[in-house]
Image (spheres, coloured by chain):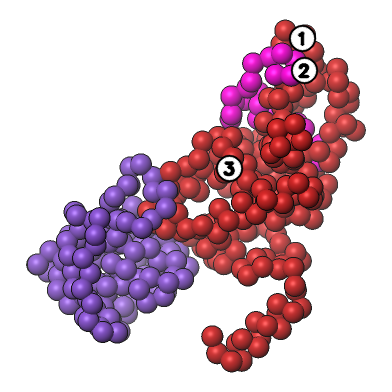
Chain colours: A red, B purple
Amino acid sequence: MSFWRAIAVGALVAAAPALLAGEIPSDARRSGYAFMGPDTRAMQDDDTANPGMLFVLDGEALWTKKTGSAEKACADCHGDARSSMKGVAARYPAFDKALARPFTLDQRINLCRANHQRAAPLPYESRDLLALSAFVAHQSRGVAITAGDDPELKPFVAQGRDLFMQREGQLNLACTNCHDDNFDKRLAGAPITQAQPTGYPLYRLEWQTLGSLERRLRSCMSGVRAQAYDYGAPELVALELYLMSRARGLPMETPAVRP
Amino acid sequence: MSLAISSPATADELVPYKIIGDTIPQSLTGTPGDPARGRALVLARTTTCILCHSGPFPEVRFQGDLAPDLKGTGNWWSAGQLRLRLVDASRFNPQTIMPSYYRNNGLVRVGRNFASKPILSATEIEDIVAYLATLQN
């Protein structure tokens, strides 16, 4: 590094002491929405055209449906989701004191099913789990993301950040190589985003269905020819937590639409 | 850069190659590659080239812009230089995002289907080198 470059970097570090190398300053953080064309934006913006809203409606029906051997519905404990669930998804993954680790919203739904409804867990990416998770997260639409604020989450956020920075796979690429260093450029014609997970679960046109952030992370891992982590693996939860904390302040969009 | 001899330790199916300066002067297969096959390989998504690079490929609609345009590559790089850059670009810049196309060890969490395999075979490297060397204007 040249002398003048060192001075310039030093000045930047002094001006933004909380910012680690390669990270995107908070005022430069942009949702994937900002990288889309007008047609896809219009589809997300219009609830009657947004295919994710069908899942939200399914989730609303499931919310009040009694299930499991306890014959209880979500609504029996949580009441009207419009007030009880507002802002909840914006702070997930959240720390669970009893189990001493972070949980995703999907995992929380299944814990509720096991502990309170006495019902079998819903499989990852199943229609019902995506619908419930979309319905709950939709109650946070417009709410600023606050995930990762709990001090007990600190080591897990750090673990997620390490994974984000870790090169892996046959192509030997880390998430940061594209999503911190090269957003706005084009990978085979498709714009690279900042990987801000503001709208999950979201409807991806490529998938022709709603999908979770874990599905997206696994697909990026396959893209660099790495062995993807299993759904619910601590590493995926840590990555999800880091990404949500990295998006702190951006408004939730669930259900987002993406190409 | 001085002379170095690379003999990848755990990479028995990779052919050994000799680095001289910033080149691998000798063909990995002992014979020259086929530029026509090389062009087809560069355009094939599975080789990953045009995910990041663009080039003189009017028939391809989607090309990347994370890396330099390949147009004119043959003007400034010799075949030996191109060969080493394909085999192991990280030799010149450890931070590069360009994968090392002829390497099969020291990588993290490689997918089951790709374990212990280089991204490109020696023959594919030679075909691509032969094609890139023709990109002169």
Find out whether the residues at labels 2 and 1 contact each other: C-beta distance under 8 Å: yes
The residue drawn where x is 42% and y is 48% is B109
Q: Is residue A121 magenta?
A: yes
Marked residue chain, label 3: A
The residue drawn where x is 20% and y is 58% is B14
Percent position (x, y) of residue B114? Answer: 33, 47
Q: Please, what secondary structure does the residue beneath circle 3 have?
A: helix
Left or right: where A29 falls relative to A206 = right
Residue type, numbered disc 3: Leu
Residue type, numbered disc 1: Ala
The residue carrying mark 2 is A116
Left or right: where A170 falls relative to B95 = left
Q: Please, what secondary structure does the residue beneath circle 2 have?
A: helix
Q: How many marks?
A: 3
Residue type, numbered disc 2: His
Residue A49 in sight in this render: no
The residue carrying mark 3 is A236
Which image quadrant for residue A123? Answer: top right
Marked residue chain, label 1: A
Determine if marks 3 and 2 fall on one subunit: yes
Instruction: Give neighbour class at mark 2: few <14, some 14-19, many 20+ (Cα, 10 Å).
Output: some
Which image quarter is the N terminus of chain A in?
bottom right
Range shown magenta: A114-140
The residue carrying mark 1 is A70
Along the polypeptide, which appears first: circle 1 or circle 3? 1
Along the polypeptide, which appears first: circle 3 or circle 2? 2
Percent position (x, y) of residue A179? Answer: 58, 60
The residue drawn where x is 41% and y is 75% is B93
Mark 1 and mark 3: Cα distance apart in space: 31 Å
